Image: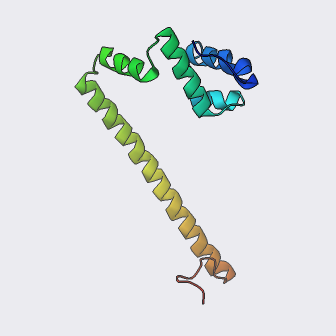
C-alpha cells in the first residue's frame, strides 16, 4: 500500500481521488481547484487505481466507445449538410459585413479627405 509522506499528500490525496472518481474531473480541472499540479494528480490517481485495481480512464474510454452503437450514416450525412448550410450562412454574413466596413472606409476617406487605410509595405 502506498504511504502518504508529505503534508500535501495527507491533505489532498483523498480529495483528488474523490474529485476524479465521484465528480468525473480530469487532472487539469483538479489542478485548478486544488493547489497541486496535474502531474501530481495524475500520479495519485494512477497509484489509487493500481491499489484498488480500478481501470484507468483510457481503458474506460475504449470500452465506452466500443459499446456505443454507430449512428445511422444517413442521419449523420443530413447533420453534416445542415452544419455546412449554417456555416455558409455565417460566411455570407461575414463577407457582407466586411464589404460594408470597406465601403464605410471609402466613404469616410472621400468625405474627410484623409487616408484611413495603411499603405502597403514596411516603413523604412
Horizontal and vertical percent for residue 105? 60, 71
Q: Which residue appears at 31% of the width and 37% of the height? A: 81
Looking at the image, which is closer to me, 85 or 41? Answer: 41
Task: Give the side of residue 76 with respect to residue 115, left or right.
Answer: left
Horizontal and vertical percent for residue 44? 58, 22
Compared to 109, does 31 lie above or below?
A: above
Rendered image quadrant of residue 116: bottom right
Task: Give the side of residue 7 with respect to residue 103, left or right.
Answer: right
Looking at the image, which is closer to me, 90 or 43? Answer: 43
Q: How is the image coloured?
A: rainbow
Horizontal and vertical percent for residue 59? 39, 20
Residue 1 visible (yes or no):
yes
Horizontal and vertical percent for residue 74? 23, 26
Counting every numbered tag in the picture gives 0
Compared to 12, does 80 lie above or below?
A: below
Position of the C terminus by quadrant: bottom right
Residue 25 visible (yes or no):
no
Q: Which residue appears at 64% of the width and 34% of the height? A: 37
Looking at the image, which is closer to me, 121 or 33? Answer: 33
Position of the N terminus by quadrant: top right
Compared to 32, does 12 lie above or below?
A: above
Q: Residue furthest top?
A: 52
Q: Which residue appears at 46% of the width and 47% of the height? A: 90
Q: Which residue appears at 48% of the width and 51% of the height? A: 93
Amino acid at each position: 500500500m502506498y504511504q502518504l509522506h508529505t503534508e500535501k499528500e495527507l491533505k489532498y490525496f483523498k480529495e483528488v481521488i474523490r474529485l476524479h472518481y465521484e465528480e468525473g474531473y480530469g487532472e487539469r480541472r483538479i489542478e485548478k481547484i486544488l493547489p497541486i499540479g496535474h502531474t501530481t494528480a495524475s500520479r495519485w490517481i494512477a497509484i489509487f487505481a493500481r491499489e484498488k485495481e480500478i481501470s484507468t480512464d483510457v481503458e474506460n474510454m475504449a470500452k465506452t466507445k466500443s459499446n456505443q452503437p454507430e449512428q445511422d450514416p444517413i442521419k449523420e450525412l443530413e447533420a453534416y449538410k445542415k452544419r455546412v448550410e449554417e456555416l455558409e450562412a455565417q460566411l455570407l454574413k461575414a463577407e457582407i459585413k466586411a464589404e460594408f466596413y470597406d465601403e464605410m472606409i471609402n466613404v469616410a476617406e472621400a468625405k474627410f479627405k484623409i487616408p484611413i487605410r495603411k499603405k502597403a509595405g514596411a516603413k523604412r
